């Protein structure tokens, strides 16, 4: 079974459109989305509609922005820029798409008995995994040997080995990563709609569970178009400018 793994789309329809046209020629059986469909960008409804239209079985969970936008959580902990984008998004969402966000399950969720998905970490959907210590806490709480997570917007792999935790950033635009049987993994496919690793290209992964291989890929897209939509919508300019540098 091959899984298309998408995360942190953040209402960026230009980025999502580019990724979905890239994978049209690739083989995958199911789609997994690790949350943060919306927030920050200018096209929340288009993004949700586009995901809904994919004609493959899907497993999806909510992210912290999805929760705030549909009113499941207040947004008290958001910074002012994130909060103003969340409020703008709430106003723009169609009732159908608001319901879509409300009904997203909470991670962690086990997919096909094969691996786990979560937004932030397996122990807390809002917690970040940046360091080996964050990963250590997560490995203690996690079932199984493979977990995909999002939230940090950094394509990365944390590996629990016999003598410690290996931390790797995925820096290439096309990286084939083979998983070993006797190790455990926390894997972030990176962000589609707001990468933060100084690479502006949209980031996603395809996981071949039978071969135990994760293929990480980057797709360039018209970042200036996504930025201009953000400006035109009256959203904070920083949300547009950062797309050009991937920060
Ligand atoms: Fe996010």
Image: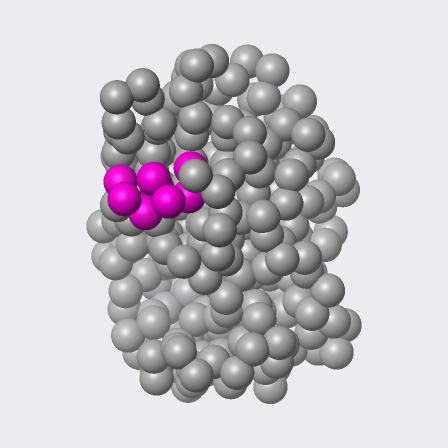
Q: Nearer the viewer, residue 40 or 63?
A: 63
Which secondary structure class fits the magenta region best?
A: helix
Is 217 displayed left or right of 88 in the figure? Answer: left
**Residue 3 location in percent, x, y?**
61, 31
Q: Quadrant of the N terminus?
A: top right
Tell me where the magenta segment starts and ends, as one range: 132-139
User: Going 45% across and 54% down the picture, which residue do you hit?
Assistant: 120
Res 89 → quadrant: bottom right
User: Going 63% across and 27% down the picture, which residue do you hit?
Assistant: 114
Q: Is residue 135 magenta?
A: yes
**Residue 191 location in percent, x, y?**
42, 50
| Type of colouring | one colour
Is 241 displayed left or right of 215 in the figure? Answer: left
**Residue 107 location in percent, x, y?**
59, 52
Q: Is residue 121 visible?
A: yes
Q: Quadrant of the C terminus?
A: bottom left
User: Going 41% across and 20% down the picture, which residue do you hit?
Assistant: 183
**Label total for image:** 0
Q: Nearer the viewer, residue 227 or 176?
A: 176
Q: Is residue 3 magenta?
A: no
User: Going 55% across and 29% down the picture, which residue do you hit?
Assistant: 144
Instruction: In the displayed orientation, state which residue is furthest to the front.
Output: 140
Res 211 → quadrant: top right
Please tell me whether residue 219 is drawn above or below residue 127 in the rendered image: above
Q: Is residue 15 visible?
A: no
**Residue 40 location in percent, x, y?**
43, 71
């Amino acid at each position: 079974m091959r899984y298309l793994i998408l995360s942190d789309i953040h209402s960026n329809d230009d980025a999502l459109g580019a990724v979905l046209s890239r994978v049209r020629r690739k083989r995958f059986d199911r789609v997994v989305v690790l949350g943060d469909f919306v927030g920050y960008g200018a096209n929340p409804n288009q993004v949700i509609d586009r995901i809904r239209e994919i004609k493959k079985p899907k497993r999806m969970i909510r992210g912290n922005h999805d929760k705030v936008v549909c009113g499941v959580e207040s947004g008290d902990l958001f910074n002012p820029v994130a909060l103003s984008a969340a409020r703008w998004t709430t106003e723009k969402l169609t009732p159908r798409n608001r319901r879509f966000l409300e009904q997203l399950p909470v991670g962690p969720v086990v997919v096909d008995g094969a691996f786990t998905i979560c937004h932030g970490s397996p122990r807390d959907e809002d917690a970040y995994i940046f360091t080996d210590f964050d990963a250590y806490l997560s490995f203690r709480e996690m079932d199984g040997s493979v977990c995909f997570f999002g939230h940090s917007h950094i394509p990365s792999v944390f590996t629990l080995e016999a003598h410690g935790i290996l931390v790797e950033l995925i820096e290439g635009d096309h990286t084939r990563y083979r998983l070993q049987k006797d190790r455990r993994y926390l894997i972030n496919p990176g962000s589609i709609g707001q990468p933060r690793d100084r690479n502006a290209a949209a980031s996603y992964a395809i996981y071949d569970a039978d071969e135990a291989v994760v293929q990480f890929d980057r797709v360039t897209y018209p970042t200036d178009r996504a930025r201009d939509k953000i400006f035109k919508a009256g959203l904070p300019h920083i949300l547009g400018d950062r797309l050009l540098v991937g920060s």
